[in-house]
Image (cartoon, rainbow, N blue to C red):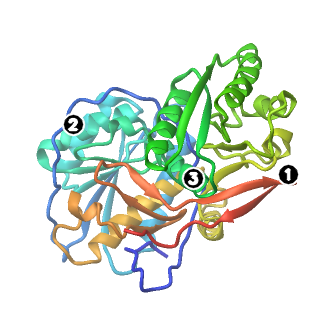
Amino acid sequence: MIARIISVSKQLKLISVIILTIVISSCAPQQRETYTGLNIDVKKPVQVALLLPKSHPKTRAVSASLENATLMAVGEMKHVQIHLRIYDTAGNPEQAAIQARKAVDDGAKIILGPLFAESANAAGMAVADQGINVLSFSNNTSVAGGNVFILGKTFQNTSNRLLKYASSKGKTRAVILYPDNIEGKFGRTALETSAKKSNVQVVNTQPFEFTQKGIVNAVPLARASIEVEDADLLLLTSNSAGALPLLGQMLPETGINIEKVQFAGISRWDIPQQTLRLKGLQGGWFTLPDETVRKNFSRRYETLYNQKPHQLAGLAFDGIAAIGALVQTGRPHALTSKGLTQSAGFEGVDGIFRFLNDRTNERGLAIAEVRDKQVYIIDPAPRFFRF
């Protein structure tokens, strides 16, 4: 089943897949003007270009899964015809620009991909003067703008949801504990931005060197900040592949009053599952996509390809789903910026999502709590966007 534009008057049928929060390599984007995209002839098949780093040695698996998900989405369309052409960027910005221009020469009305932020920026610049919109798989908000949209799950989206919920529960004085690296700084900035919109005051930020010694030294400093500033919320940006496991071991040993101070994080604390066993994360909050709808996509993918989808595969399906839903409206401007940013959003494989005017995205997320080494949904993902 392909996603459609959401109608709040109808019961939604959602499908989903895991989308991990990752920071795909960044590049300072060049300045772009805002382009509206091209009108299309909705009576004819829509030409869509898929740009992937197929020949890059480190991304062959994810490229194959993204391609499979795209083909699956196209194949499941019932009322829209899409002609798909696939182009190899080799994970190279220059090649991405060349292939983007070639795709437009071949008749593409919209581009899905590339994966890397630098390639997305290059592809967008290459076709901006021709009014072609690019739906990148990146989650790097620094390249979003003009004709480049990003499909990847962003720290900002996660932070907004988490802090809005925290504020509603009376947790309004926060300390941010983050590694002093690119990913950590992205997370800190997102949390600070969200705090301003959520009636949460960031009373201190505590960076740490991303080493065992750095983490060990940072934990008592975080406790001191909490006590001095009378904080009731400790925000963590680290994931299970980073500092989260060590933090989860050490935080209970610091003497932080867990009856008063709520721990919360902007990464997936349930991946891998053993992270849920950490004593310091019990009672903590994090966000999840709509788990009730996610399994449908994975099951169909496995049936079709005899393997599990990569965690990013759903981004490709979402991109085609949005394109198909918009084209099905029969409006010539369906794939313009105005069409793509329609506020009702779309049904995707991870629940509802929509493109924002700044070319980033918003996804419906649930709030989860770790309790007895298990995940409990304490605030479900929304079924539609409240305008």
- The relative height of residue 290 versus residue 262 in the rendered view (above or below) is below
Between marks 2 and 3 in the image, the one whose residue lies nearer the viewer: 3
Q: Earlier in the sequence, mark 3 or mark 1?
A: 3
Distance of mark 2 from mark 1, alpha carbons?
A: 47 Å
Q: Position of residue 174 (x, y in %)?
A: 60, 38
Q: Nearer the viewer, residue 313 or 294?
A: 294
Q: SS class of the residue under badge 2? A: helix
Residue 4 lies left or right of residue 382; in this view the side is left
Residue pointed to by mark 1: 373
Q: Which residue is mark 3?
A: 167
Q: Nearer the viewer, residue 42 or 282?
A: 282
**Where residue 203 sits in the image (x, y, percent)?**
56, 32
The one nearer the camera, 48 or 291, is 291
Residue shown at 41% from the left, 33% from the top: 90
- Give the crowd class for mark 3: few <14, some 14-19, many >=20 residues within 10 Å: some
> Which mark sits nearer the N-terminus, 2 or 1?
2
- Does 119 appear above or below 18? above
Residue 307 as seen in the image, left or right of residue 325: right
Three-letter residue code for mark 3: Ser
Among all residues in the image, which is located at the extreme bottom?
10
Residue type at mark 1: give it.
Lys
Mark 3 vs mark 1, CA separation in Å: 25 Å
Task: Give yes or no for contact between labels 2 and 1 (Cβ–Cβ under 8 Å).
Answer: no
Badge 3 marks a residue whose secondary structure is helix
Q: Residue at x 51, y 42 (%)?
A: 155
* Residue behind mark 2: 125
